[in-house]
Amino acid sequence: MKKKQSEQNEEILSQIEELAKNLGITVRYEKIMRESAFFPGGFCRVKDKNLIIINSKASLDDKIEIMGRALLPFDLSQIYVLPAIRELIDSFGESQQASQPD
């Protein structure tokens, strides 16, 4: 069962990476060194280029979450996104809003 879930998560990550590529976002996996804490990665702009940098040591679930949260601000309405992927990305936005105080 765990192996099947892992394969599904690999496919989800692959789909989200493809979506990022279609949006003109470069995804890079790098060894991120930070003193005293693990930093999984996130979205940034460097010289007018959109990047998602992900710690290569991050778990598969963390990689999916980083990618999903990074894509939240982008307009996906004009791009075909598999319904399950769109729902997953939207769920990260909902959890972000729920954690913010009113």
Image: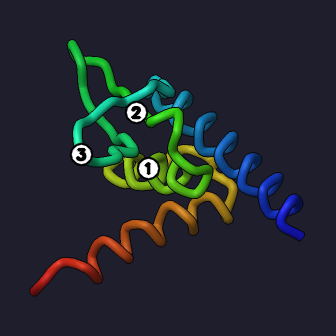
Judge left or right: residue 3 versus residue 98: right
Judge left or right: residue 3 versus residue 65: right
**Residue 70: x, y in percent?**
38, 47
Q: Secondary structure at mark 2?
A: strand
Residue found at x 50% / y 27%: 29
Task: Give me the C-alpha separation between circle 3 and circle 1.
Answer: 20 Å
Q: Secondary structure at mark 3?
A: loop
Residue denoted by label 2 = 52
Task: Give me the C-alpha separation between circle 1 and circle 2.
Answer: 8 Å
Q: Disc 2 residue type?
A: Ile
Give the number of the disc on residue 66: 1
* Mark 2 Cα shell of 10 Å, populated few (<14), some (14-19), many (≥20): many
The image quadrant that residue 15 belongs to is top right
Q: Closer to us: mark 3 or mark 2?
A: 3
Q: Disc 1 residue type?
A: Ile
**Residue 37: x, y in percent?**
28, 48
Q: Nearer the viewer, residue 58 or 54?
A: 58
* In the image, residue 51 above or below residue 5: above
Residue denoted by label 3 = 36
Is disc 3 in contact with disc 2, using a CB cutoff of under 8 Å? no
Earlier sequence position, callout 3 versus callout 2:
3
Identity of the residue furthest to the left in this view:
102
